[in-house]
Amino acid sequence: MLPLDSFSAMNESRIAELRRAKGWTQERLAQESGITVRTIQRLEAGNDASLESISLVAKALDVQVGELFQSVQTPHFSQAVEGLESRTRAEQE
């Protein structure tokens, strides 16, 4: 299992697009996900984030973690996303 480290902005985020599709403001996404507005702003700008923050945003948007990104260019990040999605599915079962 990979640690919940920060991951590089090389992974292009779709968070703003998904948030707008729901008609949500950054403030609403922050409220729904339980993280700060500043973290949402950093995520949408493509800055580094923890997998924990990314997971909370995915849950709030009702999507799989991998759907938050247009492309995953960092192999370690890809493995971490797959592992996180597997753990989330197992917890839901």
Image (tube, rainbow, N blue to C red):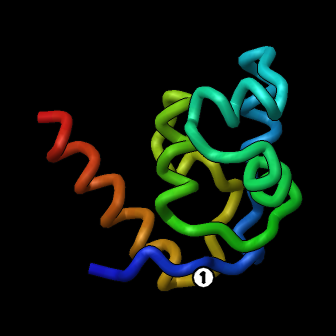
Residue 67 position within the rendered picture, expressed as x and y whole percent measured from the top left: 57, 46
Q: How many marks?
A: 1
Determine which residue is flagged by label 1: 74
User: Relative to residue 52, is residue 9 depicted above or below?
Assistant: below
Q: Nearer the viewer, residue 49 or 31?
A: 31
Quarter of the image with the N terminus in it: bottom left
**Residue depicted at 75% across the width and 30% down the height:** 19
Q: Of all residues shown, which one is farthest toward the top?
A: 23
Q: Nearer the viewer, residue 72 or 39?
A: 39
**Residue depicted at 70% across the width and 80% down the height:** 8
**Residue depicted at 82% across the width and 64% down the height:** 46
Residue 65 lies left or right of residue 49; in this view the side is: left
User: Relative to residue 47, is residue 74 depicted above or below?
Assistant: below
Mark 1 neighbour class, 10 Å CA radius: few under 14, some 14 to 19, many 20 or more: some
Disc 1 element: loop
Q: Nearer the viewer, residue 92 or 71?
A: 92
Three-letter amino acid code at the position of disc 1? Thr
Residue 83 lies left or right of residue 36; in this view the side is: left
User: Relative to residue 3, is residue 47 depicted above or below?
Assistant: above
* Rendered image quadrant of residue 45: bottom right
Residue 49 position within the rendered picture, expressed as x and y whole percent measured from the top left: 65, 68
Q: Of all residues shown, which one is farthest toward the left?
A: 93
User: Relative to residue 70, is residue 16 depicted above or below?
Assistant: above
**Residue depicted at 74% across the width and 55% down the height:** 39
Quarter of the image with the C terminus in it: top left
